[in-house]
Amino acid sequence: MINFHKFNFLDCKKLKNYLDEKNLYLYEYNPYWIFTNASFYRPEICFSNEYVYIRYNLPGTGKVYYPPIKNQGGNLEMTLLDMEDECNELGIPFYLGPIPNSDKRLYESLSYRVLPNDNLSTYIFNMSELSNLSLNKNFKADIKQFNKEHKEIFLKKVKKEDFTQIIEFISKIRDKQDELEFYPKINQLKECMDHLYELDLIGVLLLDEQATYGFAIGSLMDNCFYYHLMFYDSDVVGALPMLISALAKYAQTFSRFAAMPAHNGKKELIDLYNSLKPLRIENYNGNFNV
């Protein structure tokens, strides 16, 4: 049996050391995303001399194992058989995912049927493009209208003491949120704010003296910045592109690329990503149907 333990704060940077320079852009490989979503996915991890193992609970599916992350040496085929044996002992199916695009052929050569899930794909953008959305023809008019209607707007880099203000803003727009996602997002927000400095997270508030219009927060891994949470007033024209661009302006000092979360079939995000035209799309691949 693999000696898993509950994924905790100390595992974040330890895992990041294993992942640095591996160019794994899928959201599920971001250690800070794993940690801040722990209450929802209940991740576990094991560090061995040869591989790093991770498994998590996918609602509606059950336990899912990450492909073994190589440390040094090791026989992948035998390791996967050991993982299958563990699942047999536990009496559960051997679900494997997310398999990165770069490893898809490898797992197919080992007789795994690899299935892509477009809804869970990660979208990669050029950071400089996001920081200049006001020049993008698809967003130019909305941002111009936003600036015209909110002339006193300013950006504020988030600090821990802003948590109450953020919660008040989210409470005001709660009826515009997906109810199924609301509480997991609140739990993720709490973890982000509790560990804001320890995880080197970057967040911004979009506001004026009268109201708050948006909040976003993310983390850096390698040369890519990950947008973890975005809350905005959907009734305010231009609030979303302004928020995306605002966070990019802060994060572009540290990163060349930006990763945006899976659209999960949401029309609003699908339209947004189509308008932005990503540099690449990292597919969530697995040996099971999500």
Image (cartoon, rainbow, N blue to C red):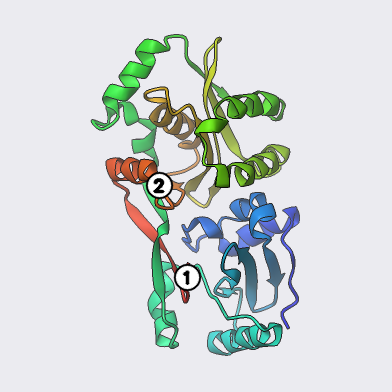
Q: Position of residue 87 (x, y in %)?
A: 65, 83
Give the image quarter of residue 195: top right
Q: Position of residue 259 (x, y in %)?
A: 44, 48
Local packing at callout 2 (Cα closer than 10 Å; few below 14, some 14-19, many 20+) is few
* Residue named by callout 2: 266
Name the amino acid type tagged 1.
Answer: Ile
Mark closest to the chain's N terminus, 2 or 1? 1
Assess whether mark 1 and mark 2 are in contact (beta carbons under 8 angstroms): no
Q: Position of residue 239 (x, y in %)?
A: 42, 26
Give the image quarter of residue 138: top left
Local packing at callout 1 (Cα closer than 10 Å; few below 14, some 14-19, many 20+) is many
Most foreground residue, 126 or 229: 229
Whether residue 126 appears in this view of the structure is no
**224 to the left or right of 129:** right
**130 to the left or right of 67:** left
Residue at figure coordinates x 29%, y 45% from the top left: 274
Whether residue 51 appears in this view of the structure is yes
Screen quadrant of the N terminus: bottom right
Residue at figure coordinates x 41%, y 27% from the top left: 242
Q: Position of residue 272 (x, y in %)?
A: 34, 40
Most foreground residue, 278 or 197: 278
Q: Secondary structure at mark 2?
A: loop
Question: Taking 21 as reference, is 229 above or below it?
Answer: above
* Residue named by callout 1: 99
Name the amino acid type tagged 2.
Answer: Lys
Residue at figure coordinates x 34%, y 30% from the top left: 132
Q: Secondary structure at mark 1?
A: loop
Which mark lies nearer to you, 2 or 1?
Answer: 2
